[in-house]
Amino acid sequence: MLDAPSPNDLAPFWMPFTANRQFKSAPRMLTGAKGMMYTSQDGREIIDGTAGLWCCNAGHGDPRIVKAIQDQAAELDYAPAFQMGHPKAFELASRLATMMPGDLDHVFFTNSGSESVDTALKIALAYHRANGEASRTRLIGRERGYHGVGFGGISVGGIVNNRRFFGSLLAGVDHMRHTHLPEQNAFSRGQPEHGAELADDLERLVALHGAETIAAVIVEPMAGSTGVLMPPKGYLERLRAICDKHGILLIFDEVITGFGRLGSSFACEHFGVQPDIVTTAKGLTSGTVPMGAVMVRKHIYDAFMHGPETAIELFHGYTYSAHPLACNAALATLDVYRDDQLFERCAEMAPYWEEAVHSLKGLPHVIDLRNMGLIAGIELESIPGQPTKRAFDAFLKCYEKGVMTRTTGDIIALSPPLIIEKSHIDQIFETIADVLKTIE
């Protein structure tokens, strides 16, 4: 029954990844956004230090992207993706294929990073079956990894609270150790020196389970949501070599690192390591319309292209795969990235950003600082018996002072839009420095 509009009560909305009771007792409402700034409900400007949720790489409200969405809604609001198509889906796939290194030249569209991960895992399993290696069913993730919130993603993921409430999850999953070595790599600039040998943990799992049982390994080339963990020098190269040795597919989760965040199109290009499958979302449309994509190498796609031409090759997809509004938003976003040279801008701004990050060294509570591209992790010493409280207090005070940050545990994570100016960087880090001097 469609009732008349009710008052804007906060109670019905069960907010995701949020302390609902705390929020609803003192709401932080955003009512507008433009460029680098949000507007709060009380009319204040809040500088966006997190690109929304790692996604608004082109900033907010770019008129070129807005117009593309408006025009597409008027022209073709929806088209089914099963046994039908529309031109912009194929145009977008072609453009993405040209951006990727090597032969990562086939694209499967999803609606989010979580869906991209589950899609990539399913493709990996189905690929080995199509290749006559149906025994390869095991999936390997990494401790402290974040791969979205689908059952596949949280199974291969390694963030404890994302897993502990949901039972046994998928069977046949194991995890390598994470790469965070603060006792050796604290206050690193870019890739840390120590830890490449941690990739050998995959050899341990091969010895335990047998290579013939392992389908794929999935890692974030730079782990974001767990608190900005950089890959040690040589780590990704070593992981690639071990996967090659044992016939295991290597999946890079680039939902965060894709589309310029490190100063290159993708992290696989930045690090010079070729994965077999890449998952993306977030920056694909600069956060304007939900969309994700999975890029696979040619031999993976070709493995499915056998049998009768009328047969469906992969029994997988979504109602909103390659949604017309999302496709046109993505095409416009790629134009903005190209025309405004935002990936190059990120690389140019990275040294200034790095100096600002490390200017916090020696301030109260700071036990580590990490940076790469336009990303930073500021790790704070936890209050005994109250983990997460110190960083959350900093988050609230920064918001009061007009800067949006993000926290995970007692780590402040930053990832601003790529349109950021040096004055914005100064404002962000001056505010954080002031806050760190005042919190308990």
Image (tube, rainbow, N blue to C red):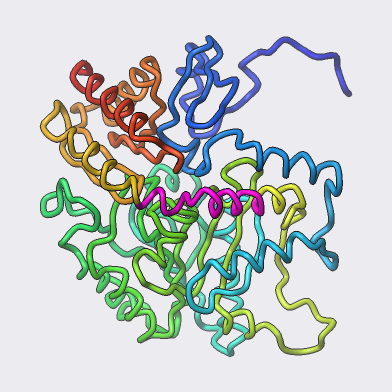
Residue 149 appears in view? no
The secondary structure making up most of the magenta span is helix
Q: Kindly indicate the quadrant of the structure image that contains residue 210.
A: bottom left
Q: Which residue is depicted at the point 60% across and 63% down?
A: 119
| Vertical order, 305 against 26 (above or below) | below
Front-most of residues 121 and 400: 400
Residue 128 appears in view? yes
Instruction: Assess whether residue 337 is covered by the magenta stretch.
Output: yes
> Horizontal and vertical percent for residue 354?
25, 44
Q: Kindly indicate the quadrant of the structure image that contains residue 5.
A: top right
Relative horizontal placement of residue 365, taking residue 309 as reference (left or right): left
Q: Looking at this rendering, what residue extends furthest in the front direction?
A: 339
Q: Looking at this rendering, what residue extends furthest in the right direction?
A: 1
Q: Which residue is depicted at the point 34% across and 21% down?
A: 398
> Horizontal and vertical percent for residue 335?
61, 53
Segment tinted magenta in the rendering = 330-347
Q: Which residue is depicted at the point 21% across and 33% down?
A: 380
Q: Quadrant of the N terminus?
A: top right
| Vertical order, 438 against 96 (above or below) | above
Q: How many marks?
A: 0
> Horizontal and vertical percent for residue 63?
65, 36
Relative horizontal placement of residue 18, taking residue 382 as reference (left or right): right
Q: Which residue is depicted at the point 38% across and 48% down?
A: 224
Relative horizontal placement of residue 358, taking residue 275 as reference (left or right): left
